[in-house]
């Protein structure tokens, strides 16, 4: 369909898909692409992408016959960037039993050598630390350590790095949701959100200490963010089982001291898997934006601690399920807009038996109406039979002055991998989306 979205100066906005990594580039059946994070891994002045790939075509990676069918291997990949956003060098830094169903990654310079290291959360077992070999980061093997206190102890879905005590060394923060596909028994047992502090050599298991900060029913987020605006990083927790979020206030000082605060929400329930943060109503307080029980919405932080947070609807992409999101000024009008992606719930490796009424793979963006309590205009980009868009990162990759987006795409083997969406501006309306491949999972009509 032709785009109706326009910039502040009246030009039309459309999108061109570009492939960064996929099974053809990788040379093997790369699939289940999930989390990604961006940073200058080799310190050459260009952004690189660390991405994780569960490498299965089932919803439950742990479902396999131990005698006949091997478990999915999983892969952790780096796409090294260049001056040309269409030229990338892709390598694998972890796979197999080191990365069983990897779900998320974080980067930070843990050992203090000036090069970002990588931590990966795997759904089938553990956290693994991968140490950057520095100048040889593209060619040498990355030394590694499976954090011993995590090995075989649950299912890790999110991981973050943050210097919580301002001592110059980042801590890892992770939520253990207990099982990859939690059942009734798993929901009834609380599992921890933990901080992993390193003192000494990060490749020595004895250098890591785990501190549990709270226990929840299927915790699925533990994101560091200065939510109270006092200059240090707090931790936002999301619980799938309890359908709630909370935060741990960082009390400051040279030791990590955290106190749990409730986030009571009026108008919707939030499980906190993917959220972004912005002072969306301009009152000087950071608000929370994310999927809720009512649709995509934002939750206004109250002026007084302990008061209710009020929900405001942004919009829905029903029957599709909003999961991944990112904020950026897409149309250059000076206001934050929101890009959102969904999960398809049909077969991951087959387009048969999928119709337009199911939850499919959609990308759309919501245009800020200036008065953020009013209706946001939705602009649909793409809706395919299969696609899982778990994470977006806003970057002006082609340096043309408008915002593009990096993303992974899963649920759609053999079309999974890492992509970027180039924003195109034109005097006349063009097709809202131009895909990178001639053959792909079919585009589908909207259902509203």
Image (cartoon, rainbow, N blue to C red):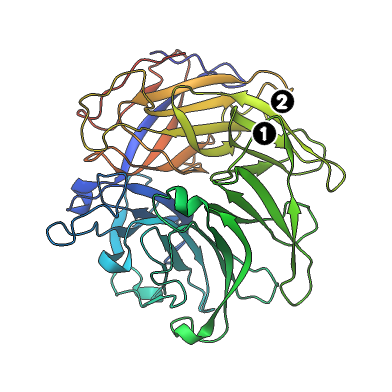
In the rendered view, does 298 fall on the left or right side of 249? Answer: left
Answer few, some or many: residues within 10 Å of disc 1's Cα (few below 14, many 20 plus, some between 14 and 19): many
Question: Which residue has dot 2 on it?
Answer: 372
User: Which percent across, then down, holds residue 272?
Assistant: 59, 45
> Looking at the image, which residue sits at the far left?
68
Instruction: Identify whether 204 is placed above or below 390.
Output: below
Query: Which quadrant holds residue 384?
Result: top left
Q: Which mark is residue 85?
A: none
Instruction: Identify whether 246 is placed above or below 347.
Output: below
User: Which percent across, then down, holds residue 383?
Assistant: 37, 24
Q: Nearer the viewer, residue 240 or 22?
A: 240
Q: Secondary structure at mark 2?
A: loop
User: Nearer the observer, disc 1 or disc 2?
Assistant: 1
Question: Which residue has dot 1 on it?
Answer: 298
User: Which percent across, then down, holds residue 204?
Assistant: 45, 85
Q: Secondary structure at mark 1?
A: strand
In the rendered view, does 178 fall on the left or right side of 138? Answer: right
Identify the mark nearer the N-term, 1 or 2: 1
Answer few, some or many: residues within 10 Å of disc 2's Cα (few below 14, many 20 plus, some between 14 and 19): some
User: Which percent across, then down, holds residue 26?
Assistant: 22, 53
Residue sitting at 74 percent across and 22 percent down? 371
In the rendered view, does 200 fall on the left or right side of 407? Answer: right
Where the N terminus falls, by quadrant? top left
> Looking at the image, which residue sits at the far right?
304
Residues at marks 1 and 2 touching, judged by CB atoms closer than 8 Å: yes
């Amino acid at each position: 369909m032709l785009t109706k979205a326009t910039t502040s100066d009246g030009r039309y906005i459309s999108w061109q898909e570009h492939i960064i990594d996929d099974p053809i580039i990788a040379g093997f059946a790369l699939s289940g692409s999930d989390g990604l994070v961006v940073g200058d891994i080799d310190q050459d002045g260009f952004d690189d992408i660390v991405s994780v790939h569960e490498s299965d075509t089932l919803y439950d990676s742990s479902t396999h016959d131990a005698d006949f069918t091997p478990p999915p291997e999983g892969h952790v990949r780096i796409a090294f960037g260049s001056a040309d956003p269409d030229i990338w060098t892709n390598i694998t830094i972890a796979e197999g039993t080191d990365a069983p169903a990897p779900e998320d990654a974080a980067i930070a310079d843990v050992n203090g050598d000036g090069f970002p290291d990588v931590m990966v959360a795997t759904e089938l077992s553990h956290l693994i630390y991968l140490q950057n070999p520095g100048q040889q980061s593209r060619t040498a093997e990355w030394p590694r350590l499976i954090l011993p206190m995590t090995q075989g102890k649950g299912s890790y879905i999110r991981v973050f790095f943050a210097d919580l005590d301002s001592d110059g060394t980042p801590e890892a923060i992770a939520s253990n949701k207990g099982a990859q596909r939690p059942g009734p028994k798993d929901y009834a047992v609380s599992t921890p959100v933990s901080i992993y502090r390193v003192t000494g050599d990060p490749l020595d298991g004895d250098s890591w200490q785990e501190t549990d900060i709270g226990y929840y029913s299927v915790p699925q987020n533990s994101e560091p963010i200065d939510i109270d605006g006092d200059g240090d990083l707090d931790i936002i927790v999301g619980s799938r089982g309890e359908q709630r979020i909370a935060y741990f206030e960082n009390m400051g000082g040279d030791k990590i001291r955290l106190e749990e605060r409730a986030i009571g929400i009026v108008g919707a329930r939030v499980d906190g898997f993917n959220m972004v943060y912005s002072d969306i109503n301009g009152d000087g307080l950071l608000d929370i934006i994310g999927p809720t029980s009512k649709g995509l919405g934002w939750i206004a932080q109250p002026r007084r601690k302990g008061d209710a947070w009020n929900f405001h609807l942004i919009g829905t992409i029903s029957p599709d399920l909003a999961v991944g999101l990112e904020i950026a000024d897409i149309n250059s009008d000076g206001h934050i807009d929101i890009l959102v992606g969904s999960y398809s719930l049909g077969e991951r490796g087959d387009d048969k038996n999928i119709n337009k009424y199911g939850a499919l793979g959609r990308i759309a963006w919501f245009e800020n109406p200036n008065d953020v309590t009013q209706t946001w205009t939705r602009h649909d980009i793409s809706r395919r039979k299969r696609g899982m868009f778990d994470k977006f990162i806003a970057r002006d990759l082609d340096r043309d002055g408008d915002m593009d987006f990096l993303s992974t795409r899963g649920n759609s083997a053999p079309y999974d991998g890492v992509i970027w969406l180039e924003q195109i501006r034109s005097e006349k309306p063009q097709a809202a989306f131009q895909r990178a491949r001639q053959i792909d999972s079919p585009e589908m009509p909207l259902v509203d």
